[in-house]
Image (cartoon, rainbow, N blue to C red):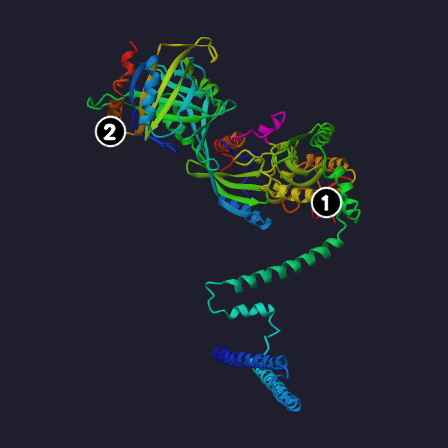
Amino acid sequence: MGVATDTETVCHVPVAEGKSVQQTVDIVHKKLEQLGAVKHGSFCVDCETYHATGNASGQPSKLLYVMHNSETPLSCMALFEGGPCLIADANFDVLMVKLKSHFQNAKGHKVECRGSRYRYCDFLIKVGTVTMSSSARGISVEVEYCPCIVPGDCWNLMKEFMLSFLGTNVPELPSVFAAKPEGLFAPADCVDTMTQYLELFNKLRKLQISGSNVR
Amino acid sequence: MADAVSVGVNLDAFSHAISGIQALRSSVSRVFESLKDGMKNRDSLEGREKLFLAEFQDHLQAVNRDLSELERLSGLVGRPSESHPLHNSGLLSLDPVQDKTPLYSQLLQAYKWSNKLQYHAGLASSLLNQQSLKRSANQMGASAKRRPKVQPSTLVLPPHYVDDVISRIGRMFPDMNIELFRPNGTSAVLLVTLGKVLKAIVVMRSLFIDRTIVRGFNENIYSDDGKLDLWTKSQYQVFQKVTDHATTALLHYQLPQMPDVVVRSFMTWLRSYMKLFQASCQRCGRFLQEGLPPTWRDFRTLEASHDTCRM
Amino acid sequence: MEAPPVTVMPVTGGTINMMEYLLQGSVLDQALESLLHRLRGLCDNMEPETFTDHELVYLLKGQQGNPFILRARRSLSHPNAPWHLRYLGQPEVGDKSRHALVRNCVDVAASHSLPEFLNEMGFRMDHEFVTNGHIFRKGGMKIVVSKLSRVLVPGNTENTERLSLSYLVELSVLAPAGQDTVSEDMRSFAEQLKPLVHLEKIDPSKQRH
């Protein structure tokens, strides 16, 4: 625990016309560097999907996601879509192995997002390539404005910032924040961030299935 | 080497000069000896007179001779160099046993310090004379006699009066939470929590604001040992900037006769940071300027603008 | 029945295949003070630590086979501390000459949403109890002397009733599989506690019936 609480948003950047994923990432990097952002290490977010192998009550099985974030390297987050979530230490992965007769790992569903971190003033920007079954599927941009803990307060400010390097691809206020009356970023954990990554991953997965994102 | 030689010559001249002094002293005492003895023990009065005068003359001549000899020798000894900044104490450097008596190096050090101190004090006093920065009433009346009368009213206020003023200000601004601590003695330290935006630590001396530091809402206010952390600056550039501006505000809002008004004005000004992240700059209309939101608040209008836009 | 101890699945973090070596025994309430005194002398020089924990035992019933058991524990004396989730495997049969009970063990620190999350996973709470007592350490060994109390009204840890007139004494070590020398150390330590308490290798699965 003890993770800084602040405001951040994760969004999906469409691959530029006639460019590969890597080329588009390079363009975003270049724009950030022109702005004065400084590269500050790398990051990785991953997500495993599990489904219950038929429970006694016979309800349709829910998907259980187990995610890791290099920002909180000793933690592991487990969540049900729209349901409760659990923050645990890395031993939770071992527990899932023990539970494999009840929860099966959907191997083809493993998603990974890797990329570079940038710092600009009090902003933290992470540009990542989303990989599914070893092929690059899309680009994620995570922007974090560290000093502010109420997303609604600094949303306009963040939008202006994102406009300066993402152009027109600026997202709307993430639904995780809009849903909260206070709009307060969840204290002491990265639940909201991970929820946003999960939404992004699921969106990219659907794009992949419908085939509209092929090159 | 040259030093050794000149020292040797000097020493020689010294010993000569000393024996010269001795000779002079003995010849002078001989003069007085003969004067004291007078003219007795002589046969005839005339003979006595003559002899006495001749003797006296001889003695005086001897004194004269010794004196001129001494004068000559003193020319050889040479004057102590007046140009040395430490005057005669500079001769301490001639002491060969430096290990045992580091007197000379200490002396030099002390001399440098006192010189520097004088220089800086001079600069400071000329600077202070230019500033009209009156932080307490006792500077208003320059006369020293008035000082003790003014002091008790503003600098030494009973703690419960300060508590009272602060709690009244706290009630005025419901969105601002003011906690009062007295970690050391009677001086109060205020922890001001402004909405979910920032936390400010305000160090008071009586009702005068001495110092302030602003940090983010999610930053630590207490150090590891559980005490208020009065020193660590915010990790965020935006709050470092706000801290700078708040310090400027402290110097701006000054009314020595009514310190409670000053605290109230400062708090009113600080409260305008409620919309730190929501307000756009009143000058350029944008939210960000070099990655920072509008951190400046006008002292009169409380208008938000970027630090770079306010000029 | 249980997942085999060696895994072939990709694991991103955590310590795989930790084993708990366990010896158990009990003392009557009257003998508690002399046992504590003894332990203070034998164990590492540290502040004697006391604890009060609330443990909830959860079961996940599959279509066949034994239910999957998880133990969730929270500290009542430190309500802000993370929850402790524990999986304990079946005792290893194998070597009779081994002095301690050996079973697979996974310890997970978890956020306070644990009960809700376990429910969502399909687990159901089977029983709960409150345990309070003293904890000692000697090197890697942990000695817990605790009193178990029944929770009379579900969820209410204020209202409890002690289960017996004695204290449970447990000597345990967590070590990677295959380090059987630890059981030697445990045995010699247990020897030093005789005759105050006799620590033995007790198989819980054999006691259930």
Main secondary structure found in the magenta portion: loop
Q: Is residue A177 magenta?
A: yes
Q: Say which residue appears at 59% left-offset and 62% top-offset.
A: B112
* Left or right of residue B243: residue A24: left
Q: Which three-letter amino acid code belongs to the residue tagged 1? A: Leu
Q: Read off the chain for label 2.
A: C
Magenta-span inclusion, residue C155: no
Horizontal and vertical percent position of residue B147: 77, 44
| Residue C94 horizontal/vertical position (percent) | 22, 22
Most extreme residue toward the front is B43
Q: According to the image, label 1 marks what residue?
A: B251
- Is disc 2 placed on a helix, strand or loop? loop
Q: Which residues are magenta?
A: A174-189
Depth check, front residue: C154 or A123: C154
Tell me where residue C85 appears, x and y as whole percent: 41, 23
Question: In the rendered image of this protein, does residue A26 appear above or below residue A187?
Answer: below
Name the residue tied to disc 2.
Answer: C180
* C117 over B51 or under it: above or below: above
